[in-house]
Amino acid sequence: MDTKKKVLFIDRDGTLVIEPPVDYQLDSLEKLEFYPKVFRNLGFVRSKLDFEFVMVTNQDGLGTSSFPEETFWPAHNLMLKTLAGEGIAFDDILIDRSFPEDNAPTRKPRTGMLTKYIDNPDYDLAGSFVIGDRPTDVELAKNLGCRAIYLQDSTESLKEKGLENVCALATTDWDQIAEFLFAGERKAEVRRTTKETDIYVALNLDGSGICDISTGLGFFDHMLEGFARHGFFDLSVKAEGDLIVDCHHTIEDTGIVLGNAIKKAVGDKKGIKRYGSCILPMDETLVLCAVDLSGRPYLSFDGNFTVERVGYMDTEMVKEFFYAISYTAGMNLHIKVLTPGNNHHMIEAMFKAFARALDEATSYDPRITDILSTKGSL
């Protein structure tokens, strides 16, 4: 049994509390404002998961005339007292007082304050995380040999320093942070090669809608991009198929591989809502989609098209695609066109409604600490 300790190295300003604008100093009680949803989520992580909590913060010039200690400690101590009242206690609190120009070895992203955790056989740094809102927090994670949870909407600002691969999650929502820590990294890569097709799919359920799609079918690519962006899934699809015959094998086999990737990424389904639904309008068209990640495959598809194809995608392949997903992912999937209209609109609304429903079904609910089933398994 692995008894190594895992740590959350948590930044303070911009992570636990809102960083004051202009001077960036939390030097009065009036400036104390907690980050949205930090209480319930960090309290949940503290009570349910086995992480030590270590606060790591740079406080520029603390104790000098530019930042007197008597203005720092009242707000800091009230912050700690309030967090403790919500069950959030820290095993260690590390404060660096230097200015950036001092280049102190203790200042983030340097690791001088964290030597007790480095090369210590008692700690699992590879399974630990730095949580913070600045690139220096991600760089600290790299220097420690752990990964980062970045409180920003994207990793774009990390690319210049080559830090995007250190970042396990980029989000400004503490709900998503708790979900990620509880459920683990929900990613999957699946490849399936037959005499008819060669399909590769990489899926991250906790992504931001980044996609890289190439199936040889422009309209199908467009639908998969909509699925990724509206479900906030990171999705890569590379498909080579016998398009000289028709589009059937390429679309069906992509559904098979995507369904397998969904099943693999969802994992044991602990903590997820399991059910998701969406009624989505697109101009004159209205589509309903409902998902149950029950482990029992079933597709109910109610939609009639009035043309044989849109672009180079046969409309009869829409049902086949969702059938393949439902059966390989092991999901109960209902899709119904409530108000028919333009065929392009109906198909696009189906893909987007499915994305929204699946996003809800795979999302974390802090009230669910096991699997949402009276059977105990799905």
Image: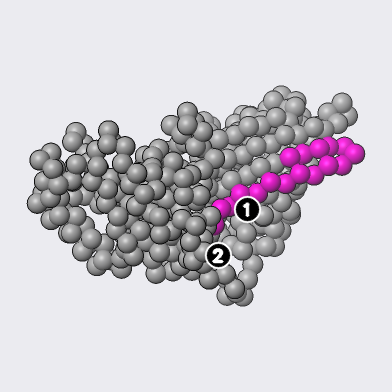
Q: Residue at x 57, y 40 (%)?
A: 234
Q: Is residue 166 above or below residue 308?
A: below
Q: Give x and y (percent) for residue 285.
A: 56, 35
Q: Residue at x 68, y 49 (%)?
A: 261
Q: Is residue 225 above or below residue 367?
A: above
Q: Determine the image quadrant of residue 107.
A: top left
Q: Main secondary structure of the magenta part?
A: strand
Q: Give x and y (percent) for residue 323.
A: 73, 48
Mark 1–mark 2 Cα distance, whole angstroms, equals 12 Å
Q: Is residue 132 above or below residue 76?
A: above
Q: Residue at x 18, y 45 (%)?
A: 62
Part of the protein shown in magenta = 184-200
Instruction: Work out whether residue 300 or residue 211 is closer to the camera in this orientation and state it.
Output: 211
User: How has the structure been colored for display?
Assistant: one colour
Q: Determine the image quadrant of residue 245.
A: top right
Q: Amino acid at mark 1?
A: Ala
Q: Amino acid at mark 2?
A: Lys
Instruction: Work out whether residue 120 or residue 162 is closer to the camera in this orientation and state it.
Output: 120
Are there few (<14), some (14-19), or many (20+) residues within 10 Å of tag 1? Answer: many
Q: Which mark is residue 265?
A: 1
Is residue 211 found left or right of 172 in the rendered image? right
Residue at the spot of label 2: 270
Are there few (<14), some (14-19), or many (20+) residues within 10 Å of tag 2? Answer: many
Is residue 30 found left or right of 204 in the rendered image? left
Is residue 230 found left or right of 72 in the rendered image? right
Quadrant position of the N terminus in the picture: bottom right
Quadrant position of the C terminus in the picture: bottom right
Instruction: Please say whether residue 289 is visible from this viewpoint.
Output: no
Q: In this view, which residue lies farthest toward the bottom?
A: 375
